[in-house]
Amino acid sequence: MNLASMPRSLDEAVEALSATPGALAIAGGTDLMVEINAGLLLPRAVVALADVPELAGWTVHEGHLLLGANLTFAQLSHPDLAVLAPALAQAARAVGSPQVRNVGTLGGNIGTAAPTSDLLPALTALGAVVTCRGPRGWREVPLGELLAGRRRPALLPGELVVSVRVPLTRGPQEFIKVGRRNALAPTVASFALVIDLDHRYIGCAAGAVAPAPVRLTEAEQWLATAIDWVVGRVADPGVYDRFGELVARQLDPVDDYRAPAAYRRHVIAVCAARALRRALPTR
């Protein structure tokens, strides 16, 4: 494996990937280097993206939060961002160790699309849209379409994740994960909940139960009818457990060495009920 280049602009990065078929883009390398070192991934070359300015930083524009692909987990959990996208910040804080959070990136998390990713369920619940750039130009793709149950995202040859756009919402957000221990362990199951009180929108997604995050539309639609939107409350305490049951019913969890399917289904039901209880108390 050779280092193809260390581009200093987005145009240079796209050109480098196009010039070397089979090359992979790398930022923090917290996922890719594990696979490369284990011999599971053997790219012809890598293109390092750390010095590409167009991938850095974040901003607010026309009611949306625009997140550069090179934002690290630590940056995503910063208080200035956490107040705008709480579920995403909670998910970022749940990732790995401080060392991993300081170098792992948003774009890399999307690019590797690990089933146990903590960021992806939160982004799915938020309705994230991914901006990509490749030899054919720019395109925007909803995150759900980019993943679509694949082990790798549906990026075109030579294409890079440039940024992610999520709407700014007024209302509670929650992210909960379960692992074999409290830290430094792969996620067994996770759940993200976003409630937009202004637009009466519910977004929720389960992670680590399938190859990609699962958007739980049936549970979303039911919950929208069980909320008193005027006061932002749940009137009936039974709504919490019922919501958890509906979430679990929509899932067909994987059964693997980390946890059996039945356990994942139970855990997601508990997480969903707990997230809703934290987000919207009863009157």
Image (cartoon, rainbow, N blue to C red):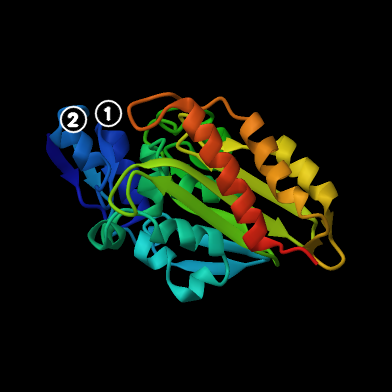
| Total numbered labels placed on residues in the image | 2
The answer to whether residue 21 is visible is: yes
Instruction: Verify CB contact (< 8 Å) between mark 2 and mark 1.
Output: yes
Q: Is residue 128 visible?
A: no
Identify the residue at the far front of this view.
238
Q: Secondary structure at mark 1?
A: loop
| Residue type marked 2 | Arg
Q: Residue at x 22, y 34 (%)?
A: 35
Please identify the quarter of the rendering in which residue 3 is found. Answer: top left
Mark 2 vs mark 1: which is more N-terminal? 1
The residue tagged 2 is: 44
- Left or right: residue 127 versus residue 104 is right
Residue at 30% across, 38% down? 17
Which of 212 and 140 lies nearest the eye of the viewer?
A: 212
Q: Nearer the viewer, residue 9 or 192?
A: 192
Question: Is 132 displayed left or right of 203 in the figure?
Answer: left
Image quarter for residue 44?
top left
Q: Quadrant of the N terminus?
A: top left
Q: Residue tagged by mark 1?
A: 21
Where residue 215 sits: x, y (%)? 62, 38
Q: In which quadrant is the C terminus drawn?
A: bottom right
Between label 2 and label 1, give the one nearer the viewer: 2
Q: Amino acid at mark 1?
A: Pro
Q: Quadrant of residue 115?
A: top left
Give the spatial CA distance, label 2 vs label 1: 8 Å
User: x and y percent of residue 270 in the render?
Assistant: 57, 45
Q: Which mark is residue 154?
A: none
